[in-house]
Image (tube, helix red, strand yellow):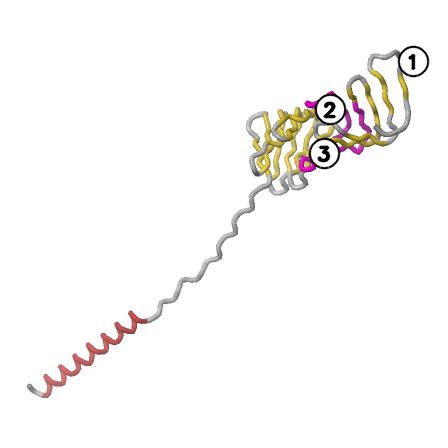
Amino acid sequence: MSARRAGLAIAALALGLGLLSLLVWLVGRPRQAPPLRPTPAAPAEPSFRLDLGGRTVRGYLADGTLLFETSVAGAEYWEESQVATLTGVECRLFRQGRVAAEVVAQRLEARFREKELRFSGEVRADSRLGPAKVTAPALLWLYDQDRLVCDQPVSLTVGGITVQGARFEADTALLRGRLYGGASFSVVGAARAGRGKRRGRGML
């Protein structure tokens, strides 16, 4: 073998060893893990669900419990503030799966963050589990407390007796409650003033 051929063979061998070393380095090199992407936070489950289908609006708690059902003349809902404004309402309030009371009002604001329904405009509430009826300019239902509240002049009728006061609170079904501030009463069907009507101060 000539010196030239021997030199070429040595060069080819050196080149092959170099390529082999490079391949071993590439295969054995630790791979960089892809950067971790932040896991998106799971959306918070809403505390309510509002069904605005047709002219009947239903409000539900997150567990599917029916809270109220009302026929309406119009409805608007703001998702960011979780407030629904309903007009021309005839609303049925549910307690433990039963209709506890029915409320008729010109306007209803369902404020789900505050857990309350605000009725206004010639409000009338009738118990569906008893004989009581309430009329007032406004009425507040704190549904998580099972409580109806009115801080304006209110008229309460139980059976044939009507009592008026400055403030009122009761359970949703109007079975137990209190009337405060200058209460008076009249008996329905009695003779006119001076014979069948009495007035007084006190608390029901």
Quarter containing the N terminus: bottom left
Q: Amino acid at mark 3?
A: Arg
Residue nearest the observer in this picture, 20 or 135? 135
Marks 1 and 3, how far apart at CA: 36 Å
Marking on residue 195? 1
Q: Residue at x 29, y 69 (%)?
A: 27
Query: Which of the marked residues, 2 or 1, is nearer the chain's N terminus?
Result: 2
Report whether 61 appears left or right of 185. Answer: left
Picture coordinates of residue 70, whole percent (x, y): 63, 26
Figure quadrant of residue 167:
top right
Start-end of magenta stretch:
128-156
Helix, strand or loop for disc 1: loop
Residues packed near mark 3 inside 10 Å, few (<14), some (14 to 19) or many (20 plus): some
Residue at label 3? 147
Vertical position of residue 130 compared to residue 110: above or below:
above
**Circle 2 SS class:** strand
Quote the CA–CA distance across marks 2 and 1.
Answer: 28 Å
Residue drawn where x is 36% and y is 67% of the image: 31
What amino acid is at disc 2? Arg
Q: Which residue is mark 2?
A: 124
Q: Position of residue 84 (x, y in %)?
A: 63, 35
Q: For the residue marked with disc 1, what is the amino acid? A: Arg
